[in-house]
Amino acid sequence: MDRPTALQQPSEHPPGQQGRAANGQNRSQFVWRALMPRALGLPVGALCLSLPLWELQRPVWVWVLLALFVFVWPWIALALSLRYREPVRFERWHILFDSFAGTFWIAAAGFSPLASCVAFAMLQANNVAAGGTRFVALGWLAQLVGVGAGVAVFGFSFHAAISLQHLMFCLPMMVLHPLVIGSTLYDLAQSVARSRRKLRTLSQTDSLTGVFNRRYWSELAQQEFLRCRRGGGPSCLALIDVDNFKAVNDSQGHLAGDELLVRLGTALCADLRETDLVGRYGGDEFCVLLPMTAEHGGGTALEWLRERVARDENGNVGLSIGLASWRPDMNELEDWIRCADQALYQAKSRGRNQVVVHRHEQAGA
């Protein structure tokens, strides 16, 4: 698991406005993503059916209607979807209309075997991609209505001719349409994966400081504890308390206290190693796990960190740090944390702003 990065810059908008803006952006992206399959798929579908329409000598108004459907309908669907707060629902209605219109044109083409089969198969692909197998049943209903409308307008005919020309007119749809559908589904899968990664990160990090939250840090600490028991260590665990943090809140306000915690979280992530695990234990306490680190090395690193924070804060902030190295006699993670907590108590009782390393004899004190 990657360690938390430095905190992102705060947004200029309140959380509620951020949520509304994000939802609006997601809706807009969905609508524009739906445009491409329709804008590219309808022309190649029309090409597929155009030869049977030509051979059946359909009148001019049929070609005008087909051109309007192919080149104007995608933009009408886009404009309609952009007007609604729930574009997914309305886009499905648009896809049902595509199914209706598709079989209407299949009937207009005299149910030409090759063109009809290709067009019908692509309509099913659209419906599956839009709503799964359940949505296909609704698509069939729309297609049945489309067939009925087509037969009512043009009468029933079966144009059975199949030739190399028919195959050539169908090839663009057979090649391009699956690519468009596949590309759209791939983009959607990538978007879902990014959203899941973002949600996972949000569930693992502290919303204020950007370091791991206590729950997730404890899970990682448990893994490290088990690793030490299997391999014998070394590893160090530290609890860090901000000295006189309540006084900062009382004198400068809670916002100043929050800003201080953010700076400390950023400093911990920046100054420790990539393999070190930083978490917020609660309130003004941080917790740090230093894998594959002996007691002396851990103490040196944390002392340097304490001095650096004091220097950066102009001596106004001190850190009391309790450090405990893993020992084979520890039965569970809580024993390790308890040792670090005892060392932290010693650091506070000795005057604060120092690093105290837990000694085995302290356990009985």
Image: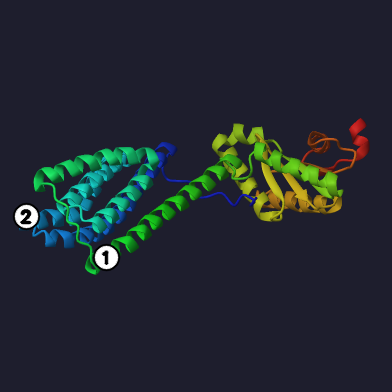
Residue 122 position (above or below residue 216): below
Q: Earlier in the sequence, mark 2 or mark 1?
A: 2
Q: Which residue is mark 2?
A: 61
Query: Is residue 240 among what the camera can see?
Result: yes
Q: Which residue is mark 1?
A: 167
Q: Judging from the image, what secondary structure is the residue with disc 1 in?
A: helix
How crowded pointer 2 is (Cα within 10 Å; few <14, some 14-19, many 20+) is rated as few
Residue 171 sits in which quadrant? bottom left
Query: Is residue 83 among what the camera can see?
Result: no
On the picture, is 116 further left or further right than 306? left
The residue that appears at 22% across and 68% down in the rendered structure is: 165
The residue that appears at 21% across and 56% down in the rendered structure is: 112
* Label 2 to label 1: alpha-carbon separation: 26 Å
Q: Amino acid at mark 2?
A: Trp
- The image position of residue 336, as x and y in percent, is 82, 38
Front residue of this view, candidates 19 and 174 = 174
Q: Amino acid at mark 1?
A: Leu
- The image position of residue 15, as x and y in percent, is 44, 38
On the picture, is 47 further left or further right than 241? left
Front residue of this view, candidates 86 and 260 = 86
Front residue of this view, candidates 360 and 77 = 77
Q: Judging from the image, what secondary structure is the residue with disc 2 in?
A: helix
Kindly report which numbered mark, 2 or 1, lies closer to the viewer in this rendering. Answer: 1
How crowded pointer 1 is (Cα within 10 Å; few <14, some 14-19, many 20+) is rated as some
